[in-house]
Amino acid sequence: MPHDHHDHLSPSGHPYRQDNDSGLTYWQTMEIAVRELLVEKGEVTASQIADQISAMDERSPANGAAVVARAWTDPDFKARLMDNASDASREMGFDIGPMHLVAVENTAEVHNLIVCTLCSCYPRNLLGLPPDWYKTREYRSRAVREPRAVLREFGVELANGVQVRVHDSTADMRYIVLPARPAGTEGMDAEALAALVSRDSMIGTGLPRTPSST
Amino acid sequence: MGGAAAGAVPMDGHDFALWEKRVDALMILGSGKGHFTVDGLRRALEDMGEPAFESMSYYERWIAAINQNLIEAGVYSLEELGEKMAEVDARGETYAAAQGISE
């Protein structure tokens, strides 16, 4: 019965977290208290907080996909991206902040995978907030230990000859995967190509879509 | 944590709740003001120990780490926090009801 659980799903089809629709929790109380103290002390304003949330909400994997598609279609841009991904992304108008962004390229021989074993560092300025699985103990523990097994859970089966490189992010240095351009896309422009670039393909847990699968 | 054995990667996601987005914003703004660094937050997170990773959600750990760093930086005192939390708690039983009048 499709409507049985309707009330428990958000418009995106994800379940709400329990703490979103139940009583006030201790940590929510702390968030309100910390926020109000910061405003009362003149450290931040309520509108700065709202603006920061809006800015983060506007960031999505579409930003990263635009960068990838440009690299696929513009060899000079790709060279600049591989040299300094922060500057190349800024060139396209994306706010990268002070972080050092490094692009790593997938080829027929090499597959790159990104993780943050310490915490949850992620190229958030290009991809938005990280998915929940990226922050889980399971992903962080196993990505560096058995990346091929982790990739299989994401439906990515690599040929035996492909080398896997796992990149462990830090607060100051974050990685983004430049996936290999799919075969059969020779005639496509950057806009059409960007639609093939999934979020996971820029983390390394997925591959770009192929024209026939979209 | 890197390299430890663990089970299958859980693939379920959720939409971020407003309070979680606010914690994220406080992290960015507080670090922009120079009150803490990501390293300072991480130190607080690691001091919580392994059990916190089982019993607390991601943003629960983050607000705890942000709060600890702000107190250490002298932005407000433990007493001020305690009084404010009691005041917030007395406003109502849900997150929406506990918002200040200025909201």
Image (spheres, rainbow, N blue to C red):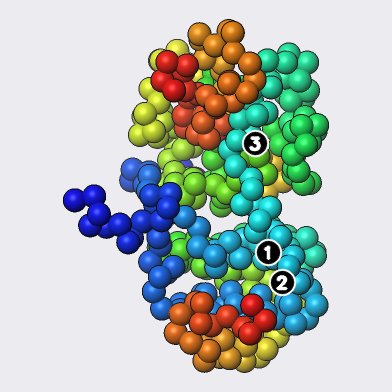
Question: Which residue occupies the foreground of this view, A21 or A78?
Answer: A21
**Is A48 displayed left or right of A9 in the figure?**
right
Q: Are marks 2 and 1 in contact (CB under 8 Å)?
A: yes
Does residue A112 appear in the picture of this structure? no
Answer with the quarter of the image where residue B86 lies: bottom right
Q: In the displayed image of the protein, which residue is found farthest to the left?
A: A1
Residue at horizontal 40%, vertical 70%? Answer: A21
Residue at horizontal 62%, vertical 83%? Answer: B100
> The residue under label 2 is which amino acid type?
Ala
Which quarter of the figure is the C terminus of chain B placed in?
A: bottom right
Q: Secondary structure at mark 1?
A: helix
Q: Are marks 3 and 1 in contact (CB under 8 Å)?
A: no
Q: Residues within 10 Å of mark 2 (few under 14, many from 20)?
A: few
Which residue is label 2 attached to?
A46
How far apart are the alpha carbons under marks 2 and 1?
Answer: 6 Å
Q: How many marks?
A: 3
Residue at mark 3 shares a chain with residue at mark 1 = yes
> The residue under label 1 is which amino acid type?
Ala
Q: Is residue A97 above or below residue B56?
A: above
Pointer 2 chain: A
Q: Residues within 10 Å of mark 1 (few under 14, many from 20)?
A: some
Residue at horizontal 50%, vertical 58%? Answer: B16
Q: Is residue A54 above or below residue A44?
A: above
Which residue is label 3 attached to?
A63
**Is B20 displayed left or right of B52 in the figure?**
right
- The mark that comes first in sequence, 3 or 2, is 2
- The mark that comes first in sequence, 3 or 1, is 1
